Amino acid sequence: MSAAPDLALPFILTLFAIAFAGSFISGMVGIGGAIVNYPLLLYIPPALGFAAFTAHQVSGISAVQVIAATIGGVWAYRSSGFLNKKLILTMGIAVLAGSFIGGFGSSGLEELTVNVVYGILAVLAAVLMLVPGKEEDPDGGGDDVQFSVPLAAGLAFVVGLGAGIVGAGGSFLLVPVMLSLLKIPARTTIATSLAVTFISSIGSTAGKVMTGQVLLWPAVILVVAGLLAAPLGAKAGQKMNTKVLKWILAILIIGTAVNIWRNLLLQLF
């Protein structure tokens, strides 16, 4: 890790606010928060007159933040009965391998390429959110849910590759994949995806740290905010209707995809 100079109080508060909002949403809808924090960290600091982070720095900081956000979220769901241990193990091993490869290899990519990968992943997630998922079973969930092990592992590895590049845990893709392709009920998806994303974020963070893409103090600020906000979001999410949670996630993903591609097209043309 390398230290970021001149962290004035207004800048610290801005980073904390961004991370707190992203982590609260992550706990509520079962994502790591990178889908929210990546564009916020990329565009808000320079818009407020602070120094801009590069895409590599944003991806590195986001990777560390996702660890904190998912730890808090999983802790809040630990006794909910919606954590599917077999699914966590199956997807966790595959996504860990993919995210480490993506995180380590991302250091050789140009900044524009990292942003393009993020944009592609956001579009894929938005499309998958439009595919009907499995209806919630009030009498089932957690370890009772059945799924295809080879399909789950293969999808998790591919998601991990892309997520590692942009410093995400991949939850903004894992959640739509679990809902639409693996047909996992929403409550089980939200809880289990947090655990899988935590495992994935370990791989992407390790790759980012080993290649010097993580700024120390911004990462610390995001970790503190994540540990505080994610459990609060998870508690709020457990009390909300699953259809509302899915719509919140869909709006976030679609809005982020539109925004990132608008900025990418401005850069290109």
Image (cartoon, helix red, strand yellow):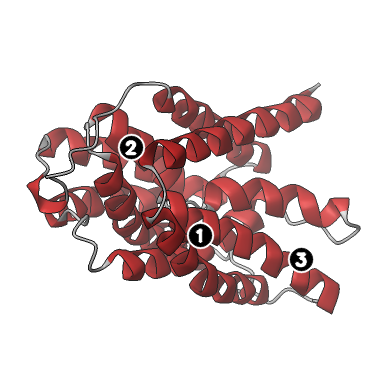
Q: Amino acid at mark 2?
A: Val
Label for residue 14?
A: 3
Measured Cα–Cα span from mark 1 to mark 3: 18 Å
Element carrying mark 3 = helix
Q: Is disc 2 surrounded by few (<14), some (14 to 19) or many (20+) residues within 10 Å?
A: some
**Alpha-carbon distance for marks 1 and 2?**
17 Å
User: Which circle's residue, 1 or 3, is located before the other in the chain?
Assistant: 3
- The N terminus appears in which quarter of the rendering? bottom right
Does 208 sit above or below residue 29?
Answer: below
Can residue 67 be seen from the camera position used here? yes
Residue 71 percent across, percent down from the top left: 38, 69
Badge number at residue 130: none
Amino acid under label 3? Answer: Thr
Residue at disc 1, secondary structure? helix
Q: Badge 3: how crowded within 10 Å, few (<14), some, or many (20+)?
A: some
Question: Which residue position is annotated with label 2?
Answer: 158
x and y percentages locating residue 24 in the rendered image: 53, 60
Please give the name of the residue rendered at 14% of the width and 57% of the height, measured from the top-left corner: 85
Could you tell me which secondary element the residue under label 2 belongs to? Answer: helix
Q: Quadrant of residue 27?
A: bottom left
Q: Is residue 88 left or right of residue 224?
A: left
Q: Earlier in the sequence, mark 1 or mark 2?
A: 1
| Residue under numbered circle 1 | 63
